[in-house]
Image (cartoon, rainbow, N blue to C red):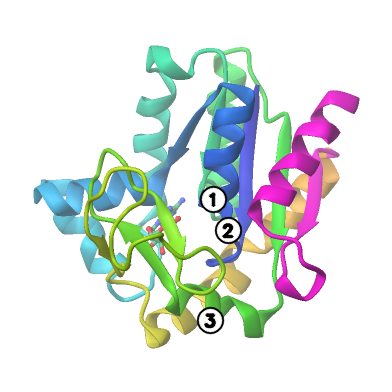
Amino acid sequence: MVIIMLGAPGTGKGTVAVLLQEKLGIKQVSTGDIFRKNMKEGTELGVLAEKYISKGNLVPDDVTIKIVEDRLDQPDVENGVILDGFPRTVKQAEELDKILAKRGKKVDKVINLTTPDEEIIERIVNRRVCSNQECKAVYNLVLNPPKQENLCDKCGSKLVTRKDDTEETVRKRLANYFEQTSPLVEYYEKQGNLLTELVSKSINKLGKDVAEDVVSQLKKD
Ligand code: AMP
């Protein structure tokens, strides 16, 4: 099964993807995590990606598509994958369809998360992530705070703020989302596999509620 997490930055794609990974037993693959790991290790890819990510821009399609294509050939995603943060452009979506078709697969479900704009900035500015690359747990100081200040509940490592989570970069990422990624909503609507979920504290619906909804929806399909 191939599931895609779609949505603007800060809507909770990563949180829902990790919960779905646990509930469905299929692997989450986040292109953002792959870039961050490479940035931390100072690889050639990391140096290139940082130039774009630090400005709130997307990493070029050819680089990103190649990474995903290689990743999809790994044995741990043979039976299923949750793509978190890919595709982000129509070109990436078209190429993904081709990559999957070559392997006798297709996109089965696209989870499109939406959150009111005013909540997005607040969510991102309060986001903290575990500095341990093997853990990568995500917290929100207001909605989902760690039990001990600045320490990860799961592994005890220090929590940090992502470098691209400044208000200025977030605004740029949001603008890029609406320009380059939001056309994918129509792209997948036409394919008939889109499931849109509102994530908002105003209706008391957060990542864990959405993950439950998605699992029950998948059972009905
Ligand atoms: P994320 O962790 O999904 O928020 O991604 C962090 C950053 O990595 C994004 O703001 C982009 O700069 C870059 N990135 C992640 N996924 C992609 C993608 N599919 N295409 C281009 N850039 C990406």
Label 2 – label 3 distance at C-alpha: 12 Å
Q: Mark 3 points at which residue?
A: 121
- Answer whether labels 3 and 1 touch (C-beta < 8 Å): no
The answer to whether residue 93 shows anywhere in this view is yes
- Which is more toward the observer, 200 or 1? 200
Tell me which amino acid carries mark 3.
Answer: Ile
Q: Residue at x 90, y 26 (%)?
A: 220
Q: Residues within 10 Å of mark 3 (few under 14, many from 20)?
A: many
Q: Name the residue under label 2.
A: 12
Q: How many tags in the picture?
A: 3
- Asked if residue 212 lies in the magenta stretch, the reply is yes
The answer to whether residue 221 shows anywhere in this view is no
First to last magenta residue range = 192-221
Label 3 – label 1 distance at C-alpha: 16 Å
* CB of mark 3 near ligand 1 (< 8 Å): no
Specify the quarter for ligand 1: bottom left
- Asked if residue 92 lies in the magenta stretch, the reply is no
Q: Quadrant of the N terminus?
A: top right
